[in-house]
């Protein structure tokens, strides 16, 4: 019985790793073109924090800049209650261009981040596999250079999120807001 359970868990882990390897990365990724200001238009996730906070979430701004050693400094500014909160993250480049790693200092979770597709001047679709001691989760972000995006791009985000196993209840088009938009650097 114990060996069977371990075997099933091993197969599940192998399946999760294989699914993660099936997430594409933008061909001919050009990191310098990804830098600048973005708006978070869509967010999809099967994590518990997302399910708990989904009703409070609004559009936020994210500024991406390259560091001297080729990594990405990612600063997101978002409304939280009656104030604006900033979160800085350092995405460390991996061997494959368009793929980054990040470890949350707060939660200890490990993030495998992939720029799935982008045309750099309109939108970017980013997928993240998050692993922590309590389990793993998937997150998909849709960024836009403007506060609005074409229905085709929104549909692509929804379709890709579903392909990652996320349900319609786990996919959110973030409500627009003007709060904290001017505060982003």
Image (cartoon, rainbow, N blue to C red):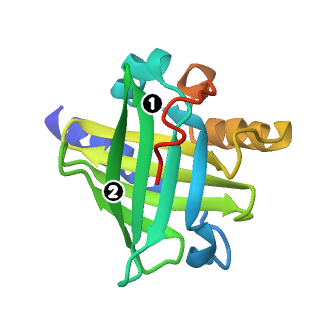
Q: CA distance from mark 2 to mark 1?
A: 21 Å
Disc on res. 166: none
Q: Quadrant of residue 161?
A: top right
Pointer 2: residues within 10 angstroms few (<14), some, or many (20+)? some
The reply to whether residue 183 is in sight is yes
**Among the two numbered marks 2 and 1 on one chain, the one whose residue lies closer to the N terminus:** 1
- In the rendered structure, the answer to whether residue 9 lies left or right of residue 28 reads left
- Residue 11, position in %: x, y? 36, 47
The reply to whether residue 22 is in sight is no
Element under label 2? strand
The residue singled out by tag 2 in the image is 89
Q: Nearer the viewer, residue 169 or 60?
A: 60
Residue at 46%, 51% (x, y): give it. 128
Circles 2 and 1, Cβ within 8 Å, touching? The answer is: no
- In the rendered structure, the answer to whether residue 185 lies left or right of residue 135 reads right
Residue 176 vertical placement versus 100 (above, below) = above
Residue 53 vertical placement versus 72 (above, below) = above
Q: Residue furthest front?
A: 182
Residue at 84%, 41% (x, y): give it. 152
- Residue 95, position in %: x, y? 43, 81
- Residue 15, position in %: x, y? 44, 49
- Residue 26, position in %: x, y? 65, 68
Pointer 1: residues within 10 angstroms few (<14), some, or many (20+)? some
Residue 67 vertical placement versus 56 (above, below) = below
The residue singled out by tag 1 in the image is 46
Q: Residue furthest bottom?
A: 69
Q: Quadrant of residue 12?
A: top left
Residue at 33%, 56% (x, y): give it. 89
Element under label 1? loop
- In the rendered structure, the answer to whether residue 166 lies left or right of residue 74 reads right
Q: Quadrant of residue 169?
A: top right
């Amino acid at each position: 019985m114990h060996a069977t359970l371990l075997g099933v868990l091993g197969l599940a882990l192998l399946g999760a790793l294989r699914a993660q390897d099936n997430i594409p990365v933008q061909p001919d990724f050009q990191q310098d073109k990804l830098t600048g200001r973005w708006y978070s238009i869509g967010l999809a996730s099967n994590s518990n924090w997302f399910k708990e906070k989904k009703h409070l979430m609004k559009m936020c701004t994210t500024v991406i800049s390259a560091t001297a050693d080729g990594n990405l400094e990612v600063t997101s500014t978002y409304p939280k209650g009656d104030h604006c909160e900033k979160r800085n993250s350092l995405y460390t480049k991996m061997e494959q261009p368009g793929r980054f790693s990040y470890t949350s200092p707060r939660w200890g979770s490990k993030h495998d981040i992939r720029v799935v597709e982008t045309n750099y001047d309109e939108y970017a679709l980013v997928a993240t596999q998050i692993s922590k001691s309590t389990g793993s989760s998937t997150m998909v972000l849709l960024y836009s250079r403007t506060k609005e995006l074409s229905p085709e791009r929104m549909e692509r985000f929804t379709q890709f999120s579903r392909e990652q196993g996320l349900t319609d209840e786990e996919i959110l088009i973030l409500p627009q807001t003007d709060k904290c938009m001017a505060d982003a650097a």
